[in-house]
């Protein structure tokens, strides 16, 4: 029997098997899960304050900052006391150098503004440096790294049974963006808060969320099988 001959492609290269495409979009936590994360960290901070401990108070500041701003963890670790714009009529933080060396302001809610002001005063009471260029988050060995902040988030996610590989700290940024977009469906607002140079990077959050789909498929045919 004559053998069939397999011809190479025009470039002579082997054809690679394409990877399956993920259509689920960015990984994020639901509003209920973020609220549970915040509540757990806040309760731990209250207990730490009663016992005169530092860790829980600092942990809650980390969780509040990340969930209330959508900052990248590297940006949160690099935040300085002088970057907090919390004077009269001001509610923002300045990002000195984000991804791609992009700087800019992020508008913050009043609750976070009050928390940051309290936290900086608390640092002063502990004789921690609070000058304009001094880091917000300081550990026993100096300014805390992004990895240290990631471990804080991971700890609380594990406590709630929410931790998954590949879905932890950066998913808080995605969660913030999804929630912010759901409020007014204003892509430009999301773009400015996340400091995306191109709107194309922000379009991913305009996709329909799993929760919206769940609402739409509920009782689709009357709920009867």
Image (spheres, rainbow, N blue to C red):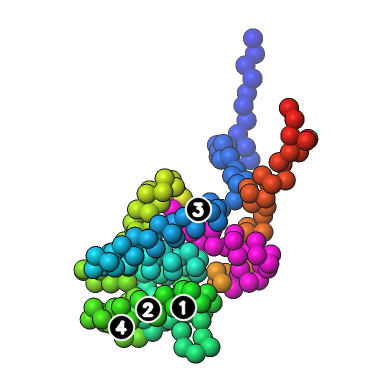
Where is residue 198, by image quadrant? Answer: bottom right
Secondary element under disc 2, as helix, strand or loop, is helix
Distance, label 3 to label 2, CA atoms, is 26 Å
Q: Residue lying furthest right in this view? A: 221
From this view, report whether residue 14 is shown above or below residue 132. Answer: above
In the rendered image, the quadrant that contains the C terminus is top right
Which residue was labeled with disc 1?
A: 113
Which residue was labeled with disc 3?
A: 33
Where is residue 184, by image quadrant? Answer: bottom right
Which residue was labeled with disc 2?
A: 118
Q: Is residue 22 left or right of residue 160?
A: right
Contact? badges 2 and 1 (CB < 8 Å): no
Of label 4 and label 3, which has the lower sequence position?
A: 3
Tell me where residue 90 appears, x and y as whole percent. Answer: 51, 86
Q: Which mark is residue 7?
A: none
Secondary element under disc 1, as helix, strand or loop, is helix
Label 1 environment density (alpha carbons within 10 Å; few <14, some 14–19, many ≥20) = many
Label 2 environment density (alpha carbons within 10 Å; few <14, some 14–19, many ≥20) = few
Which residue was labeled with disc 4?
A: 130
Magenta segment range? 168-192
Q: Is residue 213 left or right of residue 103?
A: right
Of label 3 and label 1, which has the lower sequence position?
A: 3
Distance, label 2 to label 1, CA atoms, is 9 Å
Of label 3 and label 2, which has the lower sequence position?
A: 3
- Does any portion of residue 201 appear in the rendered image? no
Q: Is residue 60 left or right of residue 183?
A: left
Tell me where residue 99 appears, x and y as whole percent. Answer: 47, 69
């Amino acid at each position: 029997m004559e053998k069939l001959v397999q011809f190479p492609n025009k470039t002579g290269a082997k054809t690679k098997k394409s990877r399956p495409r993920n259509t689920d979009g960015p990984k994020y936590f639901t509003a209920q899960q973020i609220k549970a994360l915040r509540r757990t960290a806040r309760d731990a901070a209250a207990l730490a304050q009663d016992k005169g401990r530092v860790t829980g108070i600092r942990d809650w500041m980390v969780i509040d900052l990340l969930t209330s701003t959508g900052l990248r963890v590297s940006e949160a670790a690099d935040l300085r006391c002088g970057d907090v714009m919390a004077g009269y009529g001001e509610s923002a933080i300045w990002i000195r150098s984000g991804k791609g060396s992009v700087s800019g302001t992020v508008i913050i809610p009043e609750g976070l503004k009050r928390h940051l002001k309290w936290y900086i005063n608390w640092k002063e009471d502990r004789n921690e440096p609070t000058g304009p260029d001094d880091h917000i988050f300081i550990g026993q060995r100096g300014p805390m790294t992004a990895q240290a902040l990631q471990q804080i988030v991971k700890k609380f996610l594990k406590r709630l049974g929410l931790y998954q590989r590949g879905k932890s700290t950066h998913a808080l940024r995605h969660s913030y963006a999804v929630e912010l977009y759901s409020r007014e469906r204003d892509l430009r607002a999301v773009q400015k808060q996340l400091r995306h140079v191109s709107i194309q990077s922000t379009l991913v959050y305009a996709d329909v969320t799993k929760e919206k789909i769940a609402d739409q498929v509920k009782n689709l045919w009357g709920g009867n099988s």
